[in-house]
Amino acid sequence: VLHLDWLLQSFEAKTLLNPTDYLLIYDELAEKRYRFSMRLTLKNGSERREEGGLFAGWSIFFCRGVAGNNAPKEEELNMIVKAAGGSIITYSDLPLPYERNRAHIFVITSDPATEEQTCDYQAATLAKNGAGFYTTTWL
């Protein structure tokens, strides 16, 4: 996991900078704020890199209100998912074509999920048709 400055400075330089200088290995504040374990994240990421990335073959749908609510901003969430080999499903992509495999979709809510998110028709339809339903803590 890297500091956002790596992405911004890489963009400005128009090349990928060495990520070693931007590692967030011991960011206790971020771990507490976003409720995750950096050591576990790195272990899982190492295993998945060999398979094309943590989210290779998976799509992520973020419910309204997730971004910025004890989670990174929307553009940062999207970059994280894409960098991990996944794709984003937005409300404008819905409804999905019938042949789309919902078993490879994660629906993400805030933690705890808001009432709006648990009552979201599109999210509930995805979950009803096989998508996993998770909070940002899982992510």
Image (cartoon, helix red, strand yellow):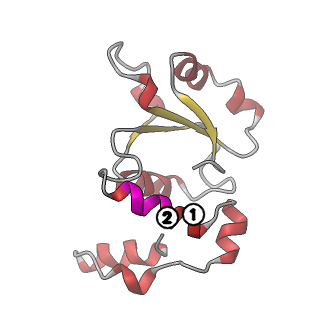
Question: Number of numbered discs present?
Answer: 2
Distance Cα–Cα, label 1 vs label 2: 5 Å
Reading the image, the residue beneath label 1 is 40
Residue at horizontal 59 percent and vertical 50 percent from the top: 67
Please, which residue is most extreme toward the left here?
A: 15
Examine the rendered structure and indicate whether residue 136 appears above or below residue 26: above
Q: Nearer the viewer, residue 4 or 55?
A: 55
Reading the image, the residue beneath label 2 is 43
Q: Quadrant of residue 11?
A: bottom left
Q: Position of residue 53 (x, y in %)?
A: 35, 53
Q: Position of residue 29 (x, y in %)?
A: 70, 75
Q: Position of residue 52 (x, y in %)?
A: 29, 51
> Is residue 45 left or right of 34 when viewed as pictured?
left
Examine the rendered structure and indicate whether residue 134 appears above or below residue 95: below
Q: Residues within 10 Å of mark 1 (few under 14, many from 20)?
A: few
Label 2 SS: helix
Residue at horizontal 39 percent and vertical 38 percent from the top: 58
Q: Which residues are magenta?
A: 44-48
Q: Quadrant of residue 100?
A: top left
**Does 138 appear in magenta?**
no
Residues marked 1 and 2 touching at CB (< 8 Å): yes
Residue at horizontal 30 percent and vertical 56 percent from the top: 50
Q: Residues within 10 Å of mark 2 (few under 14, many from 20)?
A: few
Residue at horizontal 51 percent and vertical 52 percent from the top: 74
Which amino acid lies under the numbered mark 1 shown in the image of this protein? Answer: Leu
Which amino acid lies under the numbered mark 2 shown in the image of this protein? Answer: Lys
Q: Position of residue 82 (x, y in %)?
A: 36, 52
| Label drawn at residue 96 | none
Please, which residue is most extreme toward the top here?
A: 98
Our reading of the magenta stretch's main secondary structure is helix
Examine the rendered structure and indicate whether residue 9 appears above or below residue 132: below
Examine the rendered structure and indicate whether residue 54 appears above or below residue 133: below
